[in-house]
Image: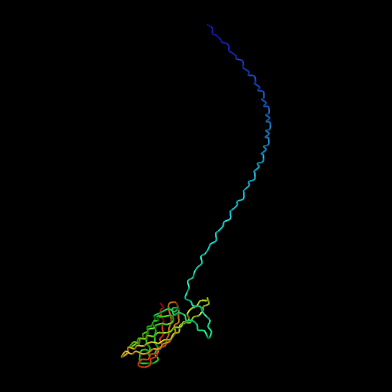
Amino acid sequence: TPPTTTPPTTTPPTTTPPTTTPPTTTPPTTTPPTTTPPTTTPPTTTPPTTTPPTTTPPTTTPPTTTPPTTTPDTQIQPVTPTTPNQVQELSPVRATPNYVGIGGNIGFGGDTTLGESAFTVFSKIGLTNNFSFRPAVLLKDDAVFLLPVTFDYPVQSVTDFGEQRISFVPYVGVGAAISTSGDSTVGFLLTGGVDVPISPEFTATAGLNVGFLDGTDVGLRFGIGYNF
């Protein structure tokens, strides 16, 4: 068998025609302008606020009545000017306090303790308006008791504030003197002196005593008394 010859197959080339894409034209987009109409705000009218006036009623304060103060009468004696023919009324001795005190005695001669230097204890006790009992005892080797009753005459003065006060109180008196030396001797006594208030609590005092015992004894007594 003769060989079979297959003739070659010729495939003609395929030609792809070029594809032409027409350009795309985008038409411009026109945005119309947005017009915002103007907003008109009507004016706000605030009505005026009328505050009614506040009327405060007047306050009436009732008058305060202070009751009158009654000051009790004091024992201050008014000062009465004196004339030569007028005698000033004596002030009560109660204006000067009673007292008890201690002190010393200076002797000016005699046979008993009254005429010697000695320690003394004394007192003043008001009896009436102007009379006082002024007992005292003088102590050394023996004792002498003095028992006089005196007439007191307070002398007043006026302070810068118009108040009266006792400046000093002179006194004179008589009584008995009793000595315990040897045989007890009782004799007549003369006394005179002065009290000087130095504070509401204390009074200074001094007095001269003359005793007629075995002889004449003289002594000056002085000291400080505590008022009561």
Residue 52 in picture, x, y percent from top left: 62, 48
Image spot of residue 42 (x, y percent): 67, 39
Q: How many marks?
A: 0
User: Foreground: 76 or 223?
Assistant: 76
Q: Is residue 79 toward the left or the right of residue 175 in the image?
A: right
Seen as rendered, the residue at the extreme left is 183
Q: Quadrant of residue 9?
A: top right
| Residue positioned most to the bottom | 215
In the displayed structure image, the side of residue 43 where residue 159 appears, left or right: left
Q: Farthest residue in the top direction?
A: 1
What's the image's color scheme?
rainbow
Whole-percent x and y of residue 155?
A: 48, 82
Which percent across, then down, holds residue 164?
A: 50, 78
Examine the rendered structure and indicate whether residue 74 appears above or below residue 19.
below
Q: Quadrant of the C terminus?
A: bottom left
Q: Is residue 227 left or right of residue 26?
A: left
Up/down of 147 relative to 13, above or below: below
